Image (tube, rainbow, N blue to C red):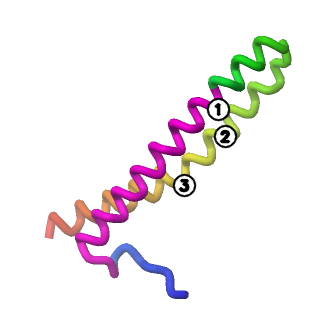
Amino acid sequence: MKKNQLSELTLDELHKKKNTLKGATIGLGIVMLIAFSILLYLVFKSRNFALITIIPAGLISLIPGIIGLAQVNSEIKLRKAK
């Protein structure tokens, strides 16, 4: 299966991809916020502070979505400038 390059997509496809990535990133962020809240409650209840290290490691999973969204946004700006 051929991978779609951003430069090969139309402007409408780029906007669809932007909305999809934005929704997925926001959705994952909300789920992670809830999970981290529960984790913090469990950390303070059990006094096992080593569990706090899961939070920064979990935040790393948001980076690919944010990078992809930034690439799509820059491609849209490039197309509008032409």
What secondary structure characterizes most of the magenta part?
helix
Q: Amino acid at mark 2?
A: Gly
Up the image or down, 32 lies above or below 39; here it is below
Magenta-drawn segment: 8-36
Q: Residues within 10 Å of mark 1 (few under 14, many from 20)?
A: some
Spatial distance from mark 2 to mark 3, Cα to Cα? 12 Å
Q: Are marks 1 and 2 in contact (CB under 8 Å)?
A: yes
In the drawing, does residue 4 fall left or right of residue 55? Answer: left
Spatial distance from mark 1 to mark 2, Cα to Cα? 10 Å
Tally the numbered discs.
3
Picture disc at residue 64: 3
Q: Secondary structure at mark 3?
A: helix
Residue depth check, mark 1 versus mark 3: number of the one nearer the observer = 1
Q: Amino acid at mark 3?
A: Pro
In the picture of the structure, the residue carrying the numbered disc 1 is 35
Q: Residues within 10 Å of mark 3 (few under 14, many from 20)?
A: few
Q: Where residue 70 appears, x then y in whole percent?
A: 39, 54
Q: Depth check: give the residue in front, 2 or 38.
A: 38
Q: Secondary structure at mark 1?
A: helix
In the picture of the structure, the residue carrying the numbered disc 2 is 58
Task: Tell me the residue at 35%/59% (across/down).
Answer: 18
Q: Secondary structure at mark 2?
A: helix
